[in-house]
Image (cartoon, rainbow, N blue to C red):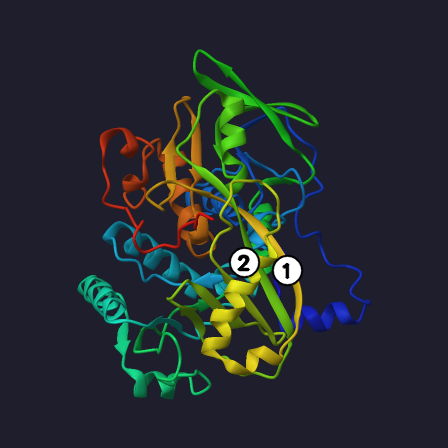
């Protein structure tokens, strides 16, 4: 892998930047791989990278039906944080946040991590109680957080409207200073580049149409470019997981819904944190380009369309204007949607499926992007060692059969709202 630095940039400038080596791809498809990863988003690419880096398993293929990072990785709002109430969830996200903090150096690729702080605004006494419980739980586990009263909140975010003259006056906030954002495209490119350099094969426009299964054991996949044999197969396709599971002959306890987000015209720097309004749920942050990135509740209907309804935009914007009245004069420039797969307990499904050697990484809902490095690390460990990584054990599919509910964030994570 060619090292990226100011010196290599200067050297290639002398030749018009025509001699850079290929970032990834360009290799022929083999007939058999030790591991085939279905899905070329952040989670699939991170798994491939850590398989090669941590375990020396390089006979790996990543198969993506479109372009790398073109699914939910490129259709999210890029938040990273670890402020979850349930210990299993907070430990997993905290491990991920620690990996985020050193990821640019490790990959020799700037994934643009910006730990600008995460604010969750309280608008009622019950919010304050809930946030205090969460903060106490996190502190006992050594995870940074604090509860801010209104004067402290005003110092952290001076532009925020904390007037008592609104329908839901802000009474304080939960604050995690290490929370923030990263650049979604850079994450996909960085992991793809790192995995390719270690010997992993990455193929775009290579849709998996079916699985080759004998005696309840997966032996390969059928693709648009022919059959590929595999020792193990990982499904990491976010909102399309139920469709892939159906091809393998089983169903999963997942709902699939569109999640919409949108951005404004570019403005001068004004919002320095990632901010969530806890009444009705609406969030906002400002990108490096100056655009205000906004979103809210998941769409209230099941579907696979990558777009949302105008009514969701209207409801989200009305809440954001309560927080920042100046937004009433800002123009929305574009909207998009991702497809989220959500289990009933709002936590992911990681590990074995009902088919031997066919593994699952799904059910992330709104939480997938922030978990990208840890998900890749843990799934790579599980694949390489033939057992579930300790951080992933609470997320086994079998929990729905056994009634294991220690990862239930149903009362905290945003849920679909019926019309």
Closer to the camera, 60 or 339?
A: 339
Closer to the camera, 67 or 176?
A: 176
Closer to the camera, 327 or 204?
A: 327
Residue found at the far top of this picture: 215
**Sequence order check, earlier mark of 1 and 2:** 2
Q: Name the side, left or right, on which 16 lies relative to 287.
A: right
Could you tell me how many numbered marks the image carries?
2
| Figure quadrant of residue 80 | bottom left
Q: Which mark is residue 248?
A: none
Q: Residue at x 61, y 84 (%)?
A: 268
Q: Which mark is residue 312?
A: 2
- Image vertical order of residue 384 relative to residue 142, above or below: above
- Image vertical order of residue 406 relative to residue 276, above or below: above
| Figure quadrant of residue 2 | bottom right
Closer to the camera, 79 or 170?
A: 170
Q: Which quarter of the rendering shows the N terminus?
A: bottom right
Q: Residue at x 42, y 66 (%)?
A: 101
Q: Which mark is residue 335?
A: 1
Real-space Cα separation, disc 1 to disc 2, in angstroms? 11 Å
- The answer to whether the residues at label 1 and label 2 have Cβ atoms under 8 Å apart is no
Q: Position of residue 82 (x, y in %)?
A: 34, 61
Q: Position of residue 74 (x, y in %)?
A: 60, 54
- Image vertical order of residue 28 relative to residue 332, above or below: above
Q: Name the side, left or right, on which 86 lies relative to 9.
A: left
Answer yes or no: is residue 2 visible.
yes
- Mark 2 packing: few (<14 Cα in 10 Å), some, or many (20+)? some
- Image vertical order of residue 194 relative to residue 153, above or below: above
Q: Name the side, left or right, on which 307 lies relative to 388.
A: right
Q: Residue at x 28, y 39 (%)?
A: 393
Q: Nearer the viewer, mark 1 or mark 2?
A: 2
């Amino acid at each position: 892998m060619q090292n990226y630095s100011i010196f290599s940039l200067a050297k290639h400038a002398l030749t018009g930047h025509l001699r850079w080596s290929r970032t990834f791809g360009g290799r022929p498809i083999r007939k058999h791989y030790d591991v085939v990863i279905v899905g070329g988003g952040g989670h699939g690419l991170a798994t491939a990278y850590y398989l090669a880096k941590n375990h020396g398993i390089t006979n790996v293929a990543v198969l993506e039906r479109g372009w790398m990072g073109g699914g939910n990785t490129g259709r999210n709002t890029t938040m990273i944080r670890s402020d979850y109430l349930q210990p299993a969830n907070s430990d997993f996200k905290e491990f991920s946040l620690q990996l985020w903090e050193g990821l640019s150096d490790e990959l020799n690729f700037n994934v643009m991590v910006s730990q600008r702080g995460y604010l969750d605004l309280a608008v009622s006494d019950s919010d304050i109680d809930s946030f205090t419980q969460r903060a106490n739980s996190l502190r006992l586990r050594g995870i940074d957080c604090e509860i801010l009263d209104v004067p402290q909140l005003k110092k952290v975010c001076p532009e925020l409207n904390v007037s008592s003259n609104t329908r839901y006056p802000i009474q304080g906030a939960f604050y995690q200073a290490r929370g923030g954002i990263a650049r979604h495209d850079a994450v996909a490119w960085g992991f793809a580049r790192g995995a390719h350099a270690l010997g992993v094969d990455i193929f775009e426009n290579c849709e998996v149409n079916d699985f080759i299964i004998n005696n309840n054991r997966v032996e390969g996949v059928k693709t648009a470019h022919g059959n590929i044999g595999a020792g193990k197969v990982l499904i990491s396709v976010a909102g399309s997981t139920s469709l892939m599971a159906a091809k393998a002959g089983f169903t999963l306890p997942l709902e699939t819904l569109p999640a919409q987000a949108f951005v404004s015209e570019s403005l001068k720097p004004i919002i320095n944190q990632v901010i969530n309004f806890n009444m009705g749920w609406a969030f906002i942050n400002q990108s490096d380009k100056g655009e205000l990135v906004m979103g809210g509740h998941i769409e209230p209907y099941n579907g696979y369309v990558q777009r949302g309804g105008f009514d969701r935009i209207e409801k989200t914007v009305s809440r954001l204007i309560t927080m920042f009245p100046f937004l009433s004069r800002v123009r929305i420039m574009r909207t998009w949607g991702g497809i989220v797969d959500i289990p009933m307990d709002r936590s992911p499904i990681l590990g074995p499926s009902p088919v031997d050697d066919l593994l699952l990484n799904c059910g992330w809902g709104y939480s997938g992007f922030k978990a990208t490095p840890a998900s890749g690390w843990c799934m790579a460990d599980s694949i390489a060692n033939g057992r579930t990584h300790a951080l992933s054990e609470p997320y086994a599919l079998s929990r729905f059969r056994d009634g294991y509910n220690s990862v239930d964030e149903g009362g905290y994570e945003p849920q679909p709202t019926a019309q």
